[in-house]
Amino acid sequence: MYYRKAGISHYARRLVCALAELQGPDFALRVLLDRRDRDAGWVPAGVGIVRAVTPAHHRYEHWVLPVELAGRGLTRSPHLVLHSPDFIACRGRFRKVITIHDLYFMEHPEVMSADGMRYYGRIRRSAAIADRIIAVSHATRQDILRLLPEAAPEKVIVIHEAADREADDERQVVSASRAPCHEPFILFVGTLEPRKNLITLLRAMARLPGAVRLVIVGAVGWRDEALGDLARELGVVERVTFAGRLSDEALDALYRRARLLVMPSLGEGFGLPVLEAMSRGTPVVCSSAGALPEVAADAALLHEPMDDATLARHIYALWTDDRLHAEYVRRSLARARQFSWARAARETLAVYRAALGSPAG
């Protein structure tokens, strides 16, 4: 594992921590870390760490990494399952499990960087050689079966993600000493890239009163470098804070302090920030694209992805109506409690065991 601290990284780390609780005589967990990754403090005690020389996301990773693992004697066991949480399986006689988070890039290659397309372009081969495929939502599973005929339906299993913490019993407000905004605000969390549809969010901001402020948390990804220029053009630049990537502690403070979270994405395989906000009792406005309605259910206000007018109306309603806001606090907490990393880990371990029962690949 070697990722920027974004969605797939959070998924992998939280899953490892939950799987660590299930170790026993018949299951031992090892984490494969890129040698460049100096942050191993999150790995739970009792979990083995393997430092890989093969660079993560290298164009020849799927060929070279199995050779490295074999050279270390790690592939000798007939009970080895290699789980690739970032779509792409390695070749080899060991069992292979991959997680597919979404396939938006297959139908919209324009939102992916050239390096990303080179790497994820191997998705068809990965779907064919994987013994089991974990889809993080039913929406993603449907896309896998529609776009990847190489993936046999019986080997595609849905396992939902969860928030990074249990849902609060009640909404709490914490000190904002490290937060980038000290006034009421709405919050966006995610990598800044076209699929997140921040253009529509900025247009919605232009429809809202001057008291409504927006904090955007996330690293710059690709092809969305001109958001600041658009904010100036729309006349909202003074009301928008680009906070960049934050520590987990600072992000937790923002989730709790925000009046609401907005997620206007053009497509999501799951949409983890929705549950992250809900677990803190923070209401959500999100688009109806991809898996977002599946994750949010009736606990969020939904809008069509490009409909900035409806997005603005929903934001304004939760911003101004305390009774409506309190109702969606209640719904958010109830919805977040329906997801659990402990359950995801148990279901993932069952997938590993099913993969071991597959014919050799």
Image (tube, rainbow, N blue to C red):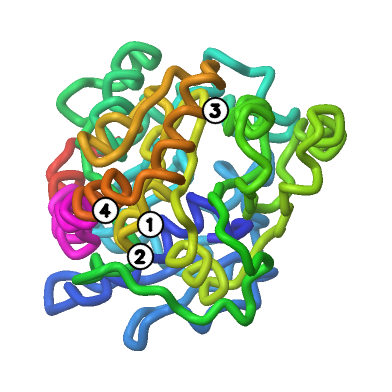
Q: Amino acid at mark 2?
A: Asp
Q: Earlier in the sequence, mark 4 or mark 3?
A: 3
Q: Earlier in the sequence, mark 4 or mark 2?
A: 2
Residue 33 located left or right of residue 327: right
Nearest-to-viewer mark from 4 and 1: 4
User: Is residue 88 shown above or below 171?
Assistant: above
**Label tally:** 4
Q: Amino acid at mark 1?
A: Glu
Q: Amino acid at mark 3?
A: Arg
Specify the segment rendered in magenta.
333-351
Nearest-to-viewer mark from 2 and 3: 2
Q: For the residues labelled 4 and 1, say whether their Cβ atoms are less than 8 Å apart.
A: no
Q: Which mark is residue 288?
A: none
Residue name at image x 60 percent, y 46 percent: 212
Q: For the residues labelled 2 and 3, say whether their Cβ atoms are less than 8 Å apart.
A: no
Cα separation, mark 4 vs mark 3, equals: 46 Å
The residue that label 4 is drawn on is 326
The residue that label 1 is drawn on is 276
Q: Nearer the viewer, residue 184 or 43?
A: 184
SS under mark 3: loop
Q: Which mark is residue 164?
A: 2
Cα separation, mark 1 vs mark 2, equals: 7 Å
Relative image position of residue 354 (x, y in whole percent):
13, 45
The residue that label 3 is drawn on is 122
Quadrant of residue 196 within the rendered picture: top right
- Callout 4: few (<14), some (14-19), or many (20+) C-alpha neighbours within 10 Å? some
Q: Amino acid at mark 4?
A: Ala
Residue name at image x 15 percent, y 26 percent: 154
